[in-house]
Image (cartoon, grey):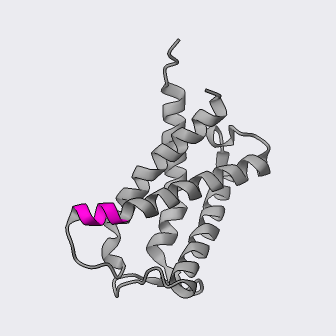
Amino acid sequence: MNAHIRLQIYLFLLAVPLHLIWEVTQIKAYDFPETSLTTVAIGCFVPSLGDGLMTLIIYWVGWVGFRDWQWVLRPGIRGYLFMMSIGLLLAVAVEWNALYLTGSWAYSERMFIVPVLGVGFLPVMQMLLLPPVTVLLLQWIWRNRRTVK
């Protein structure tokens, strides 16, 4: 398998469980019926796949912008700021769409709303923090992986 495809698979497979943990822990900030942890985890799985896709979108935009498919392996300050900027844009776009255009979800009284953006603080923080954390994990795994021959 090509190294650049493997890198993207690793990125997605690392991002999804991190986002799933975040989604499950923030569920009380959403208007979601009280239920079991299993039901919550199942309900959060599909959004976590979307979050994994958003992580890949950040990667792909960076690939084009930096003209380097390995940019996440050595992003530097510029790369991390880029991840956070694109993550912020994606978070605001997804939240705006879900809250105001489609009504896909709603916040509970526990969600702090970012005044200027009109969206929840937690989903914004999620996309500011988790893509860089995912990349740090990817870097560690990429450096320590064993090639099977």
Q: Which residues are magenta?
A: 38-43
Q: Quadrant of residue 43?
A: bottom left
Q: Is residue 106 left or right of residue 139?
A: left
Q: Is residue 66 left or right of residue 102?
A: right
Q: Residue furthest left?
A: 36
Closer to the camera in the image, 65 or 50: 50
Residue 80 in view = no
Quadrant where the N terminus is found in the figure: top right
Q: Is residue 66 left or right of residue 129?
A: right
Task: Residue at 72% x, 54% y: name it.
Answer: 61
- Residue 38 percent across, percent down from the top left: 23, 61
**How many numbered badges does the structure rendering display?**
0
* Residue 42 falls inside the magenta stretch: yes
* Residue 138 falls inside the magenta stretch: no
Q: Quadrant of residue 70?
A: top right
Principal secondary structure, stretch drawn in magenta: helix
- Residue 69 percent across, percent down from the top left: 71, 39
Task: Residue at 47% x, 44% y: name it.
Answer: 13
Above or below, comparing residue 99 to residue 38 in the picture: below
Residue 124 in view = yes
Task: Residue at 35% x, 78% y: name it.
Answer: 29
Closer to the camera in the image, 62 or 98: 98
- Residue 149 percent across, percent down from the top left: 53, 11
- Residue 31 percent across, percent down from the top left: 34, 82
Task: Residue at 65% x, 39% y: name it.
Answer: 74
Above or below, comparing residue 40 to residue 28 in the picture: above
